[in-house]
Amino acid sequence: MKKEDLIDALNEADETMVEAADQARRNYQSQKKRKAVWTRTAAGIGALAAVIAGIMIVQKPAPSESEQAIDVTPAPQEIDPKKDYSDLPVITLTRKPSVGGGGLAWVMYPDYTKETDYNPWTEEMKLEDLPVYKRPAHSAGEAWGLSEEEIRKQLTDAAELLGLKPDGFEVTYAGDNRTPGIPSEMPVFMTAECEEASVSANGYGDVTFFYNPGYGKQISEFADMDAASLSDVSAEAALTAAQWMKNEYSSLLKGSEGLIDVSRNYSYEGVGHNSYYIYAEGRSDEETLLNYAYRRIQFAGQWEYPSEIGMIRIYDSLAAAEKIGNYPLISKEEAFEQLKEGNFIGKLPDEWNADQIADAQIAYEDFHSLEYQIPYWKLIIDITDQTADLPGLPGLCTYAVCYVPAVDPSFITWKEKDPAKPEPAQTEDPQETADPKEPAETAVPEPESKPEPEQTAQPDPEVPEPSEDPSASYASNYVFISRRKQETSWYCAVACTQMILDHFGISKDQNSLAAELNTYAPGVREDGIRGTYDTDVARVLSEYLFGGQPTSIYDGGYRVQPTSGVFVQSEYDQFVTRMKRNIDDGYPSIVQIWTSYLYSGAGGENHNIVVYGYQETADGLIFYTVDPYFEGTDGGGYSTFDSYTLYQSIYSSYEPSYIW
């Protein structure tokens, strides 16, 4: 709907629609003030708008040729000489080829230059500095930092605002999952039950409510629910529904003025999905930016009943963080120079130029794999021409999303991620084995070219059986596993979980499992992470197969084991022992891999596969795996890998870990 049409219709609209229109107008005006510094003229295809988190709802008019020729870049700001930044500590960041656990930070929009978004930052804020935070370490998706009392307070306070009374609190400690790097007595997760919903909270301060069917508020009168789910409604209906969420759940904003963030992203299958957030307008520009990134509230509909609220997630990612101080900021021009020098998080083709930069904006990003929470210059770069040979969606352009620290580079040091392959130890004493890896030529994998995942998942009729040499006394074993193909690009862990449950006669469709696994679709999280945490996979498998999660080393159940980001002989030996023992006991395992080390020609991204068998040979140990996406070395999704190669792919992933 054009802005003029929306205004003409206000006389016949209800109060909710009036507020929704006002929200659209404010976002439109905000985007007019923050026009891209570098733009590339491109044909607009489709009626949906796009932003970094996804395809946004409100479409703004295309800039005229005269507007495109105007340089609206402000002059670099002078730092207030009265401010003293000399005592601020240096921040260490890690260069990575992408952000999040789902693959390269490349996204697709009809035409980014014609779109608006809900980032509250504008050019007129003229910020000189912004705060930087340091969070406690985390491993394999387990967050910590708050005490048990603090987590309980976060959970009960949120429940009280929603009128819920949780009971039956259960706490998971780092020691329960034997998570290294976190004190064993530290709480990492808490759950509780209400009549209306299940509640969970983590050590970062995030609280999630999953409503039982029939208890969530009905939204059908505010949105066109002819679609399969709330995420699939039309752009106008999504904007109206978000405004209703802000009004209906204003108690969660604790008296502050509420702002909305409605985004729409495309999956690899070409399907658009809405995401819904509200957050509080801060007392300052700085506080508003922090609320937008770290203190926000997400909504989703029920899987079975799409016209009903099914999930409310309250983020407070600063609750356990330590403020380091306010750091001076750099200009967009300086950010571009840093981009050219390679000081950014993301992935770019080998050849690109400044004319391809479609937008630049300041925003915080909640990268869970990084220790510091800092502001970035988020640069969106049109790389459609450079990726013409890769799979894409008709009518969509491809954009690289690069994050350049907005902090003065004199306060930043960079370290490289080294994915070098280990060699088998040459000594009989593991304790005397030196780290066998050699420095890699580069830590940036090439873009991946792969077929689109199929829409339906069917088990393969035959599973390759390990071959045995009857004349040799080598141990071998395997568990029969029928392959399931992942139904979306972010369902690899979901499909692996489905395969294991299938083996034990438990039939679950992937969408239902995704809900139980708290799986994130692309664009749902502002930090770019999509997919499923290993801890949720271990939890769901344990609940279905063992009646609950293990509470001691003597309990049966699946556990997450993080590993170091380099080859460690003792960790490798432990991995081999656990994989073989699990298979001997009849339980397949799931490992998180970096794909470029297993599949020839594949680009680098995090991925999950199932280990279903092993075989000792004269040349060493090999493992048998089944992949929900790639066709594998043996075809049909099945592969054979030597143990060192498989382990290499694990410790080289973003959050190196396996589920056993």
Image (cartoon, rainbow, N blue to C red):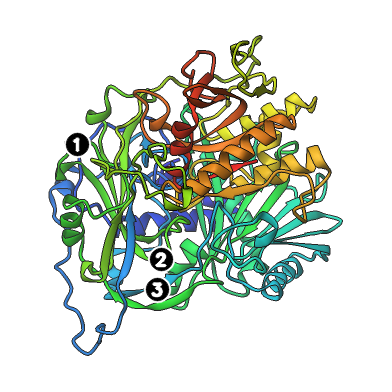
Residue 409 % position (x, y):
22, 66
SS class, disc 2: strand
Numbered circle sitting on residue 578: none
Q: Point out the frontmost of discs 3 and 2.
A: 2
- Image quarter where the C terminus lies is top right
Residue 460 % position (x, y):
63, 13
Q: Earlier in the sequence, mark 3 or mark 2?
A: 3
- Which residue is identified by label 1? 350
The three-letter amino acid code for the residue at tag 1 is: Asp
Numbered circle sitting on residue 286: 3
- Which residue is identified by label 2? 372
Q: Point out the frontmost of discs 3 and 1.
A: 1
- Image quarter where the N terminus lies is top left
> Would residue 582 appear left or right of 35 to someone viewing this image?
right
Q: Earlier in the sequence, mark 2 or mark 1?
A: 1
Q: Are marks 2 and 1 in contact (CB under 8 Å)?
A: no
Q: Earlier in the sequence, mark 3 or mark 1?
A: 3
